[in-house]
Amino acid sequence: MAEQNIAFNVEGMTSEGSVELIKNSLNMLNGVIEVIVDINTRRVVVEYDEERLSAEVIRGTIEDAGFEVK
């Protein structure tokens, strides 16, 4: 397993519901190890297995959930 960390600045998180939506969406991906969402800094950090998942898919999943990734 090749573990990687990636961080995104995410616009549109306004509630704990937003946080849960992002976490749930990302945790459904094969290869995600851990998701940390900080609503105050609008930052999402994902630890993942880069052999099974790409940063582009993670970014797309956040955007598909209705948020803007900066």
Image (tube, rainbow, N blue to C red):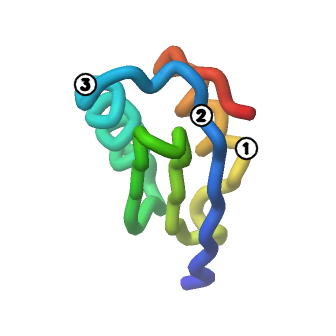
- How far is mark 3 from mark 2, CA to CA? 14 Å
Q: Earlier in the sequence, mark 3 or mark 2?
A: 2
Characterize the local packing of mark 3: few (<14), some (14-19) or many (20 or more) Cα atoms within 10 angstroms. Answer: few
Amino acid type at circle 1 is Glu
Numbered-mark total: 3
Tag 3, which secondary structure?
helix
Outermost residue on the bottom side: it is 1
Q: Residue at x 33, y 35 (%)?
A: 19
22 on left or right of 5:
left
Up-down: is 11 above or below 46?
A: above
Residue hosting label 1 = 56
Residue 25 occupies which quadrant of the picture? top left
Which of the two marks, 3 or 1, is nearer to us in this view?
A: 3
Tag 2, which secondary structure?
strand
Q: Percent position (x, y) of residue 62?
A: 54, 32
Up-down: is 2 above or below 41?
A: below
Residue hosting label 3 = 17
Q: Percent position (x, y) of residue 69?
A: 68, 31
- How far is mark 2 from mark 1, CA to CA? 14 Å
Q: Residue at x 63, y 56 (%)?
A: 7
Q: Residue at x 44, y 60 (%)?
A: 32
